[in-house]
Amino acid sequence: MILDLDIGNTLSKWRLKDAESSEIRSRGAVWTREEWRPGADIPDLDVVEAVRISSVARKAVLAQTVALLQRRVRSVHVARSEPEALGVSNGYREPGKLGVDRWLGVLAGYQLAGGCCTVDCGSAITVDFVLPGGQHLGGYILPGLRLMKESLKLGTRNVAIDPDSEADELLVPGARTVEAVNHGIYMAAVSAVNRIYSEVCDREGVSLPLLLTGGDARVVSRGVQVPHAVWPDMVYGGLEACFPLTAAERAGRMSGAPTVPRRVPLEKIRAGLAFSMLL
Ligand SMILES: Nc1ncnc2c1ncn2[C@@H]1O[C@H](COP(=O)(O)OP(=O)(O)O)[C@@H](O)[C@H]1O
Ligand SMILES: CC(C)(COP(=O)(O)O)[C@@H](O)C(=O)NCCC(=O)O
Ligand SMILES: [K+]
């Protein structure tokens, strides 16, 4: 079995993948923590022959995790942001400073769709762009839905946005504090994603497929106007592309990859942008 780990600021996600069949056997998530020991909530390491890790948690968390895994597993691969990989040039002035989850998302997106826009809705919401030739432009970082809510300190931190709500319900004026907060932060997140996407496509003169991932991808997706795909395993896709271990991975196939979303004509994106600027 292959253990894939995606250690975010809030949650550490894992999945076990069968090295022979390439099937995903199980998956889970635990709160990201300083100390991380195999227990009821993480998989049995006896069946694991290789581990692939993406981590944006504090250095000590990664060091602890790697030390623990190296005692039990033969090969442990840790992803890093590089100046260039798999046809993509990192757009950061200091490439190593780009969050590795963003880098892996971009690599997965590029392998799937060529030039694209990748959005990761987790603790932070990040939006990254890579052009059809493989140039990554850099991106945007804004607080995630939960972080925005917690920063307001209005006693609403424990009332999450219902992930099954429709965008229509979440965009109307709130008539209670908790609604005003939830609708406000939702409006902030989806407006930012819509605007950033349109601005950059306009500026670069290209309509790019849009891909969403992260814990809040499903709810953000409902407020995103352009056709797009939700890809929960996008960061894992980057790990597969960087460290291919199975036959399918070596052939360039990533588990759970969505069909590439339809490209909107650039004129339509520009018309939407011009209209929103009039308001
Ligand atoms: N079951 C859940 N537990 C915790 N957070 C969740 C859950 N479902 C959705 N979320 C949302 O997803 C975010 C965490 O998403 P994730 O992509 O795992 O973040 P990160 O990679 O930063 O750890 C939280 O900030 C929260 O808004
Ligand atoms: C921006 C992030 C905090 C997002 O992390 P996440 O919300 O997925 O936990 C992470 O990608 C990170 O720590 N990046 C380093 C800074 C940068 O990318 O510029
Ligand atoms: K994120």
Image: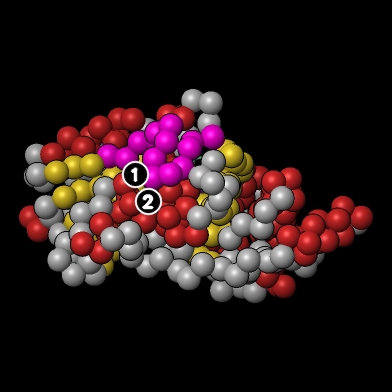
Q: Position of residue 112 (x, y in %)?
A: 44, 60
Q: Quadrant of the N terminus?
A: bottom left
Q: The disc labelled 2 sits on which kind of residue? A: Gly
Residue displayed at 18% across by 42% down: 76
Residue displayed at 39% across by 60% down: 233
Specify the quadrant of the image occupied by residue 237.
Answer: bottom left
Could one spot residue 172 in this view of the protein? Answer: yes
Query: Are the residues tagged 2 and 1 within 8 Å (C-beta)?
Result: yes
Is residue 89 one of those drawn in magenta? yes
Q: Position of residue 6 (x, y in %)?
A: 34, 49
Q: Nearer the viewer, residue 223 or 61?
A: 223
Specify the quadrant of the image occupied by residue 43.
Answer: bottom left
With respect to residue 191, does 62 lie above or below?
A: above
Q: Quadrant of the C terminus?
A: bottom right
Mark 2 residue's CB less than 8 Å from ligand 2:
no
Is residue 177 one of those drawn in magenta? no
> Is 182 left, or right, of 231 in this rendering?
right
Residue numbers of the magenta segment: 78-91
**What crowding class fits label 2: few (fewer than 14 Cα within 10 Å), some (14-19), or many (20 or more)?**
many
Residue displayed at 51% across by 67% down: 260
What secondary structure is found at the residue carrying circle 1? strand
Q: Which mark is residue 238?
A: 2
